[in-house]
Image (cartoon, rainbow, N blue to C red):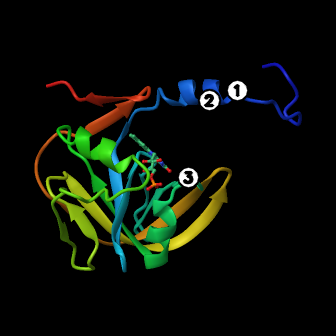
């Protein structure tokens, strides 16, 4: 170990991105039904968090235009994408436009958008938010959740999409 622990070191953002990109994740689309229609964005920072009480979390960037719309509803639904849903992931990662055009979806009991064909979904109320640099940590209390179908997940690794081998 070198360096003093109390001296802040500047970490190169590109190095941060490259190294942390080695942590593989699944891919979700976080959705909500707003008064102006459904909102959603592609999100890999989703994670399980607590069993009792039942919490999950995700981290929207402060630049996200979908997050304030989702936040205003007090709810969100995390849709876990299957390996064949890369086009959905790409479509919901674009800022602006009608991301739901041509995307079939149905409502959870609480009215949240569940995208057709996802592996599973988790419908939540927003419990608490924590400031976290250029992101916000959002903790959701799980209201309802289900598995929609058998299948393998879409993965994200080192800036690209991946799939589990057979
Ligand atoms: C695989 C993947 C994972 C992503 N994960 C996140 C994330 O965890 N948090 C986030 O804020 N943006 C994430 N993004 C970027 C957002 O999807 C994108 O910036 C956002 O959809 C922009 O649209 P908006 O302005 O409607 O929010 C991810 C993008 C991709 C392709």
Q: Determine whether, in the image, residue 99 is placed left or right of residue 67.
A: left
State the image coordinates of residue 64 (x, y, percent, origin top left): 52, 55
Q: Nearer the viewer, mark 2 or mark 3?
A: 3
Q: Is mark 3 within 8 Å of ligand 1?
A: yes
Quadrant for the N terminus, please. top right
160 left or right of 130?
A: left
Furthest residue toward front: 97
Whole-percent x, y for residue 45 in the image: 46, 48
Judged from the image, the secondary structure of the residue bearing numbered disc 3 is: loop
Residue at 47 percent across and 55 percent down: it is: 58
Disc on res. 84: none
Q: Which residue is mark 2?
A: 16
Q: Secondary structure at mark 1?
A: loop
Residue under pointer 1: 12
Find the distance from the CA under tag 1 to the CA under tag 2.
6 Å
Quadrant for residue 99, please give it: bottom left
- Contact flag, marks 1 and 2 (Cβ < 8 Å): yes
């Amino acid at each position: 170990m070198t360096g003093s622990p109390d001296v802040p070191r500047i970490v190169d953002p590109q190095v941060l991105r490259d190294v942390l990109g080695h942590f593989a994740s699944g891919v979700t689309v976080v959705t909500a039904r707003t008064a102006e229609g459904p909102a959603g964005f592609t999100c890999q920072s989703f994670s399980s968090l607590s069993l009792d009480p039942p919490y999950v979390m995700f981290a929207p960037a402060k630049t996200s235009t979908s997050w304030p719309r989702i936040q205003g509803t007090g709810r969100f639904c995390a849709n876990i994408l299957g390996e064949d849903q890369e086009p959905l992931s790409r479509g919901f990662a674009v800022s602006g436009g009608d991301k739901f055009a041509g995307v079939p979806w149905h409502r959870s009991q609480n009215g949240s958008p569940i995208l057709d064909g996802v592996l599973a979904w988790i419908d939540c109320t927003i419990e608490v938010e924590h400031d976290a640099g250029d992101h916000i940590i959002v903790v959701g209390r799980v209201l309802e959740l289900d598995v929609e179908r058998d299948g393998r997940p879409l993965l994200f690794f080192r800036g690209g999409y991946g799939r589990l081998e057979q």
